[in-house]
Amino acid sequence: MSQKDKKVVQVNSEVGRLRRLLVHSPDSGLGKVVPSKAQDWLFEDIVHLETMRKKEYDYYTKVLMYFLDPEKIRGRLHQIDAPENNRDFYKPEKPDFYKSDKVVELEWLLADVLHDQEIKLKLIASVCAVEGCSYATQNELLELSPTKLSKVIISGTIEDDRLIFPPIPNFIFTRDIGIVINEYVLLNKPAKTARLREALLAKYIFFNHPLFEIYRNNILEIPDTAHHFLLPRDGDEKKVTLEGGDVMVVHKDHLLVGISERTTMEAAHQVVNMLFERNIVKKITIIKIPRRRDYMHIDTIFTQVKRNMWVLLGAFSKKVIKHEGADPIERILEGKEKKEDKIKIIQFKKKDPENPVYFDNLEDLLTDISENDLNCKGKVKFIYSGNNKFPFDTREQWTDSCNLLALKEGVVLGYDRNDKTVEAFREAGFNVIHVKELLDQFEKEETTPDELEDTLILIPSAELSRARGGFHCMSMPLFREDIE
Protein backbone atom coordinates (compact mmCIF):
# COMPACT_ATOMS: atom_id res chain seq x y z
CA MET A 1 0.00 0.00 0.00
CA SER A 2 1.26 3.48 -0.84
CA GLN A 3 1.38 6.11 1.90
CA LYS A 4 -1.81 7.77 0.66
CA ASP A 5 -3.65 4.43 0.86
CA LYS A 6 -2.75 3.61 4.48
CA LYS A 7 -5.23 6.04 5.99
CA VAL A 8 -8.72 4.64 5.37
CA VAL A 9 -10.87 7.54 6.54
CA GLN A 10 -10.21 11.23 5.89
CA VAL A 11 -12.40 13.77 4.12
CA ASN A 12 -11.80 17.49 4.55
CA SER A 13 -13.17 18.89 1.30
CA GLU A 14 -15.70 18.27 -1.46
CA VAL A 15 -13.15 18.42 -4.29
CA GLY A 16 -9.86 16.89 -3.10
CA ARG A 17 -8.69 13.93 -5.19
CA LEU A 18 -11.01 11.02 -4.36
CA ARG A 19 -9.10 7.90 -3.26
CA ARG A 20 -11.67 5.72 -1.50
CA LEU A 21 -15.49 5.65 -1.40
CA LEU A 22 -18.41 3.43 -0.46
CA VAL A 23 -20.90 2.42 -3.15
CA HIS A 24 -23.69 -0.08 -3.64
CA SER A 25 -24.58 -1.24 -7.12
CA PRO A 26 -28.27 -1.71 -7.99
CA ASP A 27 -29.43 -5.01 -6.50
CA SER A 28 -32.43 -7.17 -7.38
CA GLY A 29 -34.59 -5.27 -4.84
CA LEU A 30 -34.85 -2.34 -7.25
CA GLY A 31 -36.49 -4.68 -9.73
CA LYS A 32 -39.15 -5.53 -7.15
CA VAL A 33 -40.45 -1.99 -6.61
CA VAL A 34 -44.12 -1.86 -7.65
CA PRO A 35 -46.13 1.27 -8.47
CA SER A 36 -48.36 0.96 -5.40
CA LYS A 37 -45.33 1.00 -3.08
CA ALA A 38 -42.95 3.22 -5.04
CA GLN A 39 -43.57 6.38 -3.04
CA ASP A 40 -43.53 4.52 0.28
CA TRP A 41 -40.09 3.27 -0.74
CA LEU A 42 -39.14 6.85 -1.82
CA PHE A 43 -39.14 6.23 -5.57
CA GLU A 44 -41.14 8.34 -7.99
CA ASP A 45 -41.31 5.60 -10.60
CA ILE A 46 -40.40 1.99 -11.23
CA VAL A 47 -37.09 1.34 -12.98
CA HIS A 48 -35.89 -1.17 -15.55
CA LEU A 49 -33.19 -2.93 -13.56
CA GLU A 50 -31.15 -4.45 -16.39
CA THR A 51 -30.91 -1.13 -18.22
CA MET A 52 -29.95 0.64 -15.00
CA ARG A 53 -27.23 -1.90 -14.35
CA LYS A 54 -25.72 -2.72 -17.73
CA LYS A 55 -26.19 0.52 -19.65
CA GLU A 56 -25.81 3.04 -16.81
CA TYR A 57 -24.42 2.10 -13.38
CA ASP A 58 -21.74 -0.23 -14.78
CA TYR A 59 -20.21 2.81 -16.49
CA TYR A 60 -20.11 4.56 -13.12
CA THR A 61 -18.28 1.57 -11.65
CA LYS A 62 -15.79 1.50 -14.52
CA VAL A 63 -14.90 5.17 -14.35
CA LEU A 64 -14.54 4.98 -10.55
CA MET A 65 -12.22 1.98 -10.91
CA TYR A 66 -10.12 3.77 -13.51
CA PHE A 67 -9.68 6.76 -11.18
CA LEU A 68 -9.30 4.91 -7.88
CA ASP A 69 -8.08 1.35 -8.56
CA PRO A 70 -6.93 1.19 -12.20
CA GLU A 71 -4.79 -1.96 -11.82
CA LYS A 72 -7.97 -4.03 -11.55
CA ILE A 73 -9.49 -2.73 -14.77
CA ARG A 74 -6.95 -1.12 -17.10
CA GLY A 75 -6.81 -2.91 -20.46
CA ARG A 76 -9.43 -5.45 -19.38
CA LEU A 77 -12.74 -3.84 -20.34
CA HIS A 78 -13.27 -5.99 -23.43
CA GLN A 79 -12.82 -9.13 -21.30
CA ILE A 80 -14.84 -7.82 -18.34
CA ASP A 81 -17.83 -6.88 -20.49
CA ALA A 82 -17.76 -9.94 -22.73
CA PRO A 83 -21.26 -11.53 -22.82
CA GLU A 84 -19.96 -14.93 -21.69
CA ASN A 85 -18.74 -13.39 -18.40
CA ASN A 86 -22.31 -12.43 -17.46
CA ARG A 87 -21.26 -9.24 -15.61
CA ASP A 88 -19.62 -11.31 -12.85
CA PHE A 89 -17.02 -8.55 -12.38
CA TYR A 90 -19.80 -6.33 -10.96
CA LYS A 91 -21.54 -8.93 -8.75
CA PRO A 92 -20.36 -9.07 -5.10
CA GLU A 93 -21.40 -12.71 -4.68
CA LYS A 94 -19.30 -13.96 -7.62
CA PRO A 95 -15.64 -15.14 -7.45
CA ASP A 96 -14.73 -12.73 -10.28
CA PHE A 97 -16.10 -9.68 -8.40
CA TYR A 98 -13.66 -6.76 -8.48
CA LYS A 99 -13.22 -6.66 -4.65
CA SER A 100 -11.62 -3.25 -4.48
CA ASP A 101 -10.60 -1.62 -1.22
CA LYS A 102 -10.82 1.74 -3.01
CA VAL A 103 -14.23 1.41 -4.70
CA VAL A 104 -15.76 -0.36 -1.73
CA GLU A 105 -19.02 -2.26 -2.22
CA LEU A 106 -21.30 -2.33 0.82
CA GLU A 107 -22.67 -5.80 0.06
CA TRP A 108 -19.11 -7.15 0.07
CA LEU A 109 -18.35 -5.47 3.43
CA LEU A 110 -21.54 -6.84 4.94
CA ALA A 111 -20.65 -10.38 3.82
CA ASP A 112 -17.25 -9.99 5.51
CA VAL A 113 -18.88 -8.92 8.76
CA LEU A 114 -21.31 -11.87 8.66
CA HIS A 115 -18.46 -14.40 8.86
CA ASP A 116 -18.46 -13.67 12.59
CA GLN A 117 -21.13 -16.00 13.98
CA GLU A 118 -22.00 -13.75 16.92
CA ILE A 119 -22.52 -10.75 14.64
CA LYS A 120 -24.49 -12.91 12.23
CA LEU A 121 -26.88 -13.96 15.00
CA LYS A 122 -27.32 -10.39 16.26
CA LEU A 123 -27.89 -8.89 12.83
CA ILE A 124 -30.39 -11.52 11.73
CA ALA A 125 -32.33 -11.01 14.95
CA SER A 126 -32.24 -7.24 14.49
CA VAL A 127 -33.37 -7.34 10.85
CA CYS A 128 -36.13 -9.82 11.63
CA ALA A 129 -37.34 -7.62 14.49
CA VAL A 130 -37.38 -4.51 12.29
CA GLU A 131 -39.15 -6.35 9.45
CA GLY A 132 -41.53 -8.44 11.58
CA CYS A 133 -40.30 -11.79 10.24
CA SER A 134 -41.59 -15.14 11.39
CA TYR A 135 -39.43 -17.41 13.53
CA ALA A 136 -39.26 -19.83 10.58
CA THR A 137 -37.85 -17.11 8.32
CA GLN A 138 -35.29 -16.21 10.98
CA ASN A 139 -34.13 -19.84 11.12
CA GLU A 140 -33.99 -19.97 7.32
CA LEU A 141 -31.67 -16.95 7.28
CA LEU A 142 -29.40 -18.59 9.87
CA GLU A 143 -28.69 -21.40 7.40
CA LEU A 144 -27.38 -19.08 4.66
CA SER A 145 -23.72 -18.48 3.93
CA PRO A 146 -22.39 -14.95 4.68
CA THR A 147 -22.30 -14.10 0.95
CA LYS A 148 -25.87 -15.23 0.31
CA LEU A 149 -27.13 -13.72 3.55
CA SER A 150 -25.64 -10.33 2.72
CA LYS A 151 -27.46 -10.34 -0.62
CA VAL A 152 -30.76 -11.42 0.98
CA ILE A 153 -30.63 -8.85 3.79
CA ILE A 154 -30.08 -6.04 1.28
CA SER A 155 -32.43 -7.14 -1.51
CA GLY A 156 -35.15 -8.68 0.66
CA THR A 157 -35.19 -11.55 -1.82
CA ILE A 158 -34.25 -15.18 -1.24
CA GLU A 159 -33.71 -17.72 -4.02
CA ASP A 160 -33.77 -14.86 -6.55
CA ASP A 161 -37.53 -14.41 -6.73
CA ARG A 162 -39.08 -14.90 -3.26
CA LEU A 163 -39.49 -11.65 -1.34
CA ILE A 164 -39.33 -12.22 2.42
CA PHE A 165 -39.33 -8.54 3.41
CA PRO A 166 -39.29 -5.21 1.56
CA PRO A 167 -36.24 -4.25 -0.51
CA ILE A 168 -34.18 -1.19 0.39
CA PRO A 169 -33.86 0.35 -3.08
CA ASN A 170 -32.37 3.57 -1.68
CA PHE A 171 -29.25 1.70 -0.52
CA ILE A 172 -27.62 2.76 -3.81
CA PHE A 173 -27.53 6.26 -2.28
CA THR A 174 -24.63 5.53 0.03
CA ARG A 175 -24.11 9.23 0.81
CA ASP A 176 -27.12 9.12 3.10
CA ILE A 177 -25.95 6.34 5.43
CA GLY A 178 -23.19 8.49 6.88
CA ILE A 179 -20.60 11.14 6.24
CA VAL A 180 -16.86 11.30 6.88
CA ILE A 181 -15.81 14.53 8.60
CA ASN A 182 -12.02 14.73 8.75
CA GLU A 183 -11.20 11.40 10.47
CA TYR A 184 -14.64 10.82 11.99
CA VAL A 185 -17.71 9.01 10.64
CA LEU A 186 -21.10 10.52 11.43
CA LEU A 187 -23.84 7.90 11.02
CA ASN A 188 -27.27 8.96 9.87
CA LYS A 189 -30.73 8.70 11.37
CA PRO A 190 -33.08 8.28 8.39
CA ALA A 191 -36.25 10.30 8.16
CA LYS A 192 -38.31 7.60 6.48
CA THR A 193 -39.22 4.12 7.72
CA ALA A 194 -38.18 2.68 4.36
CA ARG A 195 -34.55 3.46 5.20
CA LEU A 196 -34.33 2.06 8.74
CA ARG A 197 -32.67 -1.18 7.60
CA GLU A 198 -30.02 0.82 5.74
CA ALA A 199 -29.06 2.60 8.96
CA LEU A 200 -28.95 -0.70 10.84
CA LEU A 201 -26.66 -2.31 8.26
CA ALA A 202 -24.39 0.74 8.18
CA LYS A 203 -24.03 0.60 11.96
CA TYR A 204 -23.02 -3.08 11.91
CA ILE A 205 -20.54 -2.51 9.06
CA PHE A 206 -18.79 0.52 10.54
CA PHE A 207 -18.58 -0.85 14.06
CA ASN A 208 -17.50 -4.38 13.07
CA HIS A 209 -15.59 -4.45 9.78
CA PRO A 210 -11.77 -4.63 10.09
CA LEU A 211 -11.42 -1.84 7.53
CA PHE A 212 -12.69 0.64 10.13
CA GLU A 213 -11.25 -1.04 13.24
CA ILE A 214 -8.89 1.76 14.25
CA TYR A 215 -11.66 4.35 13.78
CA ARG A 216 -14.26 2.79 16.08
CA ASN A 217 -13.84 5.52 18.68
CA ASN A 218 -14.37 8.04 15.88
CA ILE A 219 -17.79 6.76 14.83
CA LEU A 220 -20.43 9.27 15.90
CA GLU A 221 -24.11 8.59 16.49
CA ILE A 222 -26.64 11.31 17.14
CA PRO A 223 -28.56 10.72 20.35
CA ASP A 224 -32.32 10.98 20.35
CA THR A 225 -33.92 13.77 22.34
CA ALA A 226 -34.64 12.66 25.91
CA HIS A 227 -38.01 10.90 26.10
CA HIS A 228 -38.41 11.23 22.31
CA PHE A 229 -40.66 8.15 22.35
CA LEU A 230 -43.26 10.07 24.40
CA LEU A 231 -43.56 12.90 21.87
CA PRO A 232 -46.49 13.15 19.42
CA ARG A 233 -46.02 11.05 16.32
CA ASP A 234 -46.51 13.84 13.77
CA GLY A 235 -45.06 17.29 13.60
CA ASP A 236 -42.88 17.19 16.69
CA GLU A 237 -40.04 19.67 16.48
CA LYS A 238 -37.77 17.48 18.57
CA LYS A 239 -37.64 14.58 16.13
CA VAL A 240 -34.02 13.69 15.28
CA THR A 241 -33.44 12.69 11.65
CA LEU A 242 -30.31 13.27 9.58
CA GLU A 243 -29.23 12.10 6.12
CA GLY A 244 -25.79 12.48 4.57
CA GLY A 245 -27.06 14.44 1.57
CA ASP A 246 -27.56 17.30 3.99
CA VAL A 247 -23.95 17.32 5.22
CA MET A 248 -20.97 18.71 3.29
CA VAL A 249 -17.37 19.01 4.44
CA VAL A 250 -16.19 22.09 2.55
CA HIS A 251 -13.01 22.59 4.60
CA LYS A 252 -11.33 20.76 7.48
CA ASP A 253 -12.68 23.42 9.84
CA HIS A 254 -16.04 24.09 8.17
CA LEU A 255 -19.11 21.88 7.83
CA LEU A 256 -22.43 22.59 6.11
CA VAL A 257 -25.59 21.01 7.54
CA GLY A 258 -28.93 21.26 5.78
CA ILE A 259 -32.36 21.34 7.37
CA SER A 260 -34.66 19.88 4.76
CA GLU A 261 -37.39 17.36 4.04
CA ARG A 262 -35.08 14.70 5.51
CA THR A 263 -32.99 16.45 8.20
CA THR A 264 -34.59 18.16 11.20
CA MET A 265 -33.73 21.25 13.22
CA GLU A 266 -33.10 19.12 16.30
CA ALA A 267 -30.65 16.90 14.41
CA ALA A 268 -28.74 19.99 13.25
CA HIS A 269 -28.71 21.24 16.83
CA GLN A 270 -27.30 17.91 18.07
CA VAL A 271 -24.64 17.83 15.33
CA VAL A 272 -23.42 21.35 16.10
CA ASN A 273 -23.07 20.62 19.80
CA MET A 274 -21.43 17.23 19.29
CA LEU A 275 -18.85 18.40 16.77
CA PHE A 276 -17.97 21.55 18.69
CA GLU A 277 -17.62 19.64 21.97
CA ARG A 278 -15.24 17.16 20.32
CA ASN A 279 -13.35 19.96 18.56
CA ILE A 280 -13.82 18.25 15.17
CA VAL A 281 -14.60 21.48 13.27
CA LYS A 282 -14.47 25.17 14.12
CA LYS A 283 -17.38 26.43 12.04
CA ILE A 284 -20.77 24.96 11.08
CA THR A 285 -23.21 26.61 8.70
CA ILE A 286 -26.85 25.60 8.94
CA ILE A 287 -28.78 25.89 5.67
CA LYS A 288 -32.54 25.65 6.05
CA ILE A 289 -34.20 25.03 2.69
CA PRO A 290 -37.90 24.66 1.83
CA ARG A 291 -39.28 21.32 3.00
CA ARG A 292 -40.10 19.97 -0.45
CA ARG A 293 -39.67 16.64 -2.20
CA ASP A 294 -38.01 18.19 -5.25
CA TYR A 295 -35.24 19.61 -3.05
CA MET A 296 -34.99 16.80 -0.47
CA HIS A 297 -31.33 17.50 0.54
CA ILE A 298 -29.00 20.47 0.14
CA ASP A 299 -26.87 18.48 -2.33
CA THR A 300 -29.83 18.48 -4.72
CA ILE A 301 -29.58 22.26 -5.08
CA PHE A 302 -25.80 22.79 -5.10
CA THR A 303 -22.49 20.91 -5.19
CA GLN A 304 -18.89 22.03 -5.58
CA VAL A 305 -16.95 21.67 -8.83
CA LYS A 306 -13.70 23.49 -8.01
CA ARG A 307 -12.43 25.61 -5.13
CA ASN A 308 -13.82 28.67 -6.89
CA MET A 309 -16.73 27.08 -8.79
CA TRP A 310 -20.11 25.67 -7.80
CA VAL A 311 -23.15 24.30 -9.63
CA LEU A 312 -26.35 25.81 -8.24
CA LEU A 313 -30.10 26.00 -8.72
CA GLY A 314 -30.79 29.60 -9.72
CA ALA A 315 -33.85 29.81 -7.44
CA PHE A 316 -31.41 30.23 -4.53
CA SER A 317 -29.16 32.79 -6.23
CA LYS A 318 -28.70 36.33 -5.01
CA LYS A 319 -30.64 37.73 -7.95
CA VAL A 320 -33.74 35.67 -7.20
CA ILE A 321 -33.61 35.89 -3.40
CA LYS A 322 -33.24 39.67 -3.50
CA HIS A 323 -35.72 40.02 -6.40
CA GLU A 324 -33.17 41.97 -8.42
CA GLY A 325 -34.64 43.17 -11.70
CA ALA A 326 -38.21 43.06 -10.40
CA ASP A 327 -40.31 46.23 -10.38
CA PRO A 328 -41.09 47.76 -6.92
CA ILE A 329 -44.57 46.26 -6.62
CA GLU A 330 -43.42 42.77 -7.61
CA ARG A 331 -40.44 42.99 -5.24
CA ILE A 332 -42.62 44.04 -2.29
CA LEU A 333 -45.27 41.40 -2.97
CA GLU A 334 -42.74 38.59 -3.43
CA GLY A 335 -40.95 39.74 -0.28
CA LYS A 336 -44.05 38.66 1.66
CA GLU A 337 -43.65 34.99 0.72
CA LYS A 338 -44.26 32.41 3.42
CA LYS A 339 -41.29 31.85 5.69
CA GLU A 340 -41.25 28.12 4.94
CA ASP A 341 -40.64 28.88 1.25
CA LYS A 342 -37.49 30.85 2.00
CA ILE A 343 -33.90 29.82 2.61
CA LYS A 344 -32.26 30.61 5.93
CA ILE A 345 -28.49 30.44 6.46
CA ILE A 346 -26.84 30.73 9.89
CA GLN A 347 -23.13 30.20 10.52
CA PHE A 348 -21.96 29.24 14.02
CA LYS A 349 -18.37 29.46 15.21
CA LYS A 350 -17.10 27.26 18.03
CA LYS A 351 -15.31 30.11 19.77
CA ASP A 352 -18.39 32.37 19.78
CA PRO A 353 -21.64 30.45 19.14
CA GLU A 354 -23.82 33.23 20.54
CA ASN A 355 -22.89 35.58 17.71
CA PRO A 356 -23.58 33.74 14.45
CA VAL A 357 -23.11 35.14 10.96
CA TYR A 358 -26.16 35.28 8.65
CA PHE A 359 -26.30 34.96 4.87
CA ASP A 360 -29.46 35.66 2.89
CA ASN A 361 -28.56 33.64 -0.23
CA LEU A 362 -26.41 30.69 -1.23
CA GLU A 363 -24.17 32.61 -3.59
CA ASP A 364 -22.88 34.81 -0.78
CA LEU A 365 -22.21 31.77 1.44
CA LEU A 366 -20.46 29.76 -1.28
CA THR A 367 -18.41 32.79 -2.32
CA ASP A 368 -17.35 33.24 1.31
CA ILE A 369 -16.28 29.58 1.49
CA SER A 370 -14.22 29.85 -1.70
CA GLU A 371 -12.57 33.14 -0.75
CA ASN A 372 -12.06 32.80 3.00
CA ASP A 373 -11.89 29.06 3.70
CA LEU A 374 -10.19 27.97 0.47
CA ASN A 375 -8.17 31.15 -0.15
CA CYS A 376 -9.29 31.54 -3.76
CA LYS A 377 -8.04 34.59 -5.60
CA GLY A 378 -10.15 36.03 -8.37
CA LYS A 379 -13.84 35.68 -9.11
CA VAL A 380 -15.92 32.83 -7.70
CA LYS A 381 -17.97 31.31 -10.51
CA PHE A 382 -21.40 29.68 -10.62
CA ILE A 383 -22.81 27.25 -13.16
CA TYR A 384 -26.59 27.19 -12.98
CA SER A 385 -28.96 24.31 -13.43
CA GLY A 386 -30.53 24.41 -16.89
CA ASN A 387 -28.24 27.34 -17.71
CA ASN A 388 -30.63 29.39 -15.53
CA LYS A 389 -33.36 29.25 -18.17
CA PHE A 390 -36.97 28.42 -17.28
CA PRO A 391 -38.32 25.73 -17.43
CA PHE A 392 -35.03 23.88 -17.92
CA ASP A 393 -33.62 25.01 -14.57
CA THR A 394 -36.28 23.22 -12.53
CA ARG A 395 -36.66 20.30 -14.94
CA GLU A 396 -32.96 19.52 -14.84
CA GLN A 397 -32.64 20.06 -11.09
CA TRP A 398 -35.32 17.35 -10.74
CA THR A 399 -32.99 15.05 -12.71
CA ASP A 400 -29.97 15.93 -10.56
CA SER A 401 -28.17 18.59 -12.57
CA CYS A 402 -26.85 20.05 -9.29
CA ASN A 403 -25.91 16.69 -7.75
CA LEU A 404 -22.40 16.11 -9.11
CA LEU A 405 -19.52 14.06 -7.72
CA ALA A 406 -16.00 15.51 -7.95
CA LEU A 407 -13.42 12.79 -8.66
CA LYS A 408 -10.82 15.48 -8.27
CA GLU A 409 -10.91 19.26 -8.45
CA GLY A 410 -12.56 20.28 -11.72
CA VAL A 411 -13.40 16.72 -12.88
CA VAL A 412 -17.01 15.82 -12.10
CA LEU A 413 -19.57 13.14 -12.94
CA GLY A 414 -23.08 14.02 -14.07
CA TYR A 415 -26.09 12.72 -15.98
CA ASP A 416 -26.15 12.92 -19.77
CA ARG A 417 -29.79 14.06 -19.90
CA ASN A 418 -29.35 17.59 -18.49
CA ASP A 419 -28.63 19.30 -21.80
CA LYS A 420 -28.89 22.95 -20.75
CA THR A 421 -26.67 22.40 -17.72
CA VAL A 422 -24.14 20.71 -20.00
CA GLU A 423 -24.35 23.77 -22.21
CA ALA A 424 -23.55 25.94 -19.18
CA PHE A 425 -20.47 23.84 -18.39
CA ARG A 426 -19.25 24.25 -21.97
CA GLU A 427 -19.75 28.01 -21.75
CA ALA A 428 -17.67 27.96 -18.55
CA GLY A 429 -14.77 26.42 -20.49
CA PHE A 430 -15.24 22.78 -19.53
CA ASN A 431 -14.51 19.83 -21.73
CA VAL A 432 -17.62 17.64 -21.88
CA ILE A 433 -17.12 13.97 -22.69
CA HIS A 434 -19.37 10.92 -22.64
CA VAL A 435 -18.15 8.12 -20.39
CA LYS A 436 -18.05 5.60 -23.26
CA GLU A 437 -15.67 7.80 -25.22
CA LEU A 438 -13.56 8.50 -22.14
CA LEU A 439 -13.20 4.82 -21.23
CA ASP A 440 -12.20 4.09 -24.81
CA GLN A 441 -9.49 6.76 -24.53
CA PHE A 442 -8.31 5.26 -21.23
CA GLU A 443 -8.14 1.78 -22.76
CA LYS A 444 -6.17 3.06 -25.76
CA GLU A 445 -3.90 5.01 -23.40
CA GLU A 446 -4.73 8.24 -25.21
CA THR A 447 -5.25 9.95 -21.87
CA THR A 448 -5.25 9.15 -18.16
CA PRO A 449 -7.29 10.29 -15.15
CA ASP A 450 -4.30 12.32 -13.97
CA GLU A 451 -4.27 14.30 -17.22
CA LEU A 452 -7.92 15.36 -17.13
CA GLU A 453 -8.69 18.94 -16.15
CA ASP A 454 -11.95 20.94 -16.13
CA THR A 455 -14.02 18.03 -17.42
CA LEU A 456 -17.66 17.05 -17.06
CA ILE A 457 -18.02 13.29 -17.59
CA LEU A 458 -21.52 12.32 -18.73
CA ILE A 459 -23.04 8.97 -17.80
CA PRO A 460 -26.27 7.49 -19.24
CA SER A 461 -29.16 8.19 -16.90
CA ALA A 462 -32.59 7.30 -18.28
CA GLU A 463 -33.24 4.80 -15.46
CA LEU A 464 -30.87 6.09 -12.77
CA SER A 465 -32.55 9.50 -12.82
CA ARG A 466 -35.91 7.90 -11.97
CA ALA A 467 -34.49 7.02 -8.55
CA ARG A 468 -34.15 10.75 -7.67
CA GLY A 469 -30.45 10.99 -6.92
CA GLY A 470 -27.24 11.76 -8.78
CA PHE A 471 -23.64 10.65 -8.33
CA HIS A 472 -23.12 12.81 -5.25
CA CYS A 473 -25.95 10.80 -3.67
CA MET A 474 -24.51 7.50 -4.96
CA SER A 475 -21.18 7.94 -3.22
CA MET A 476 -19.91 8.09 0.34
CA PRO A 477 -16.33 9.37 0.14
CA LEU A 478 -14.10 7.73 2.73
CA PHE A 479 -10.84 9.35 1.74
CA ARG A 480 -9.95 12.47 -0.20
CA GLU A 481 -6.50 13.95 -0.57
CA ASP A 482 -5.91 17.34 1.03
CA ILE A 483 -6.42 20.26 -1.33
CA GLU A 484 -4.20 22.63 0.63
Image (spheres, rainbow, N blue to C red):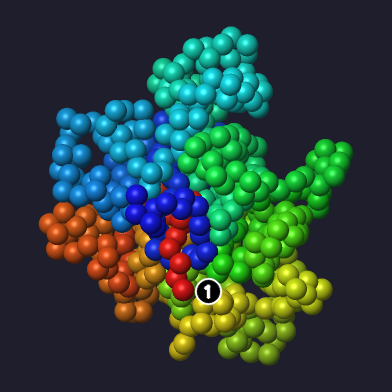
Q: Nearer the viewer, residue 128 or 363?
A: 128
56 sits to left or right of 137: left
The amino acid type of the residue labelled 1 equals Gly
Viewer-closest of 339 and 166:
166
Q: Is residue 340 visible?
A: yes
Name the residue rendered at 38%, 56% in the picture. 3
Horizontal and vertical percent for residue 465? 42, 51
- On screen, residue 424 above or below 132: below
Question: For numbered disc 1, what is the local secondary structure?
Answer: helix
Neighbor class of circle 1 (other Cα within 10 Å; few <14, some 14-19, many 20+) is many
Q: Residue at x 41, y 30 (%)?
A: 28
Question: Does 225 sit left or right of 286 as displayed?
Answer: right
Q: Where in the figure is residue 377, as x and y percent of width and height? A: 47, 87
The number of discs equals: 1
Residue indicated by mark 1: 314
Observer-nearest of 385 and 187 = 187
Q: Return the residue nearer the eye: 257 or 289.
A: 257
Q: Position of residue 173 (x, y in %)?
A: 49, 47
Q: Is residue 470 visible?
A: no
Residue at 48% from the left image edge and 83% from the top image edge: 376
Question: Measured from the top left, where is residue 470 in percent x and y?
Answer: 45, 54
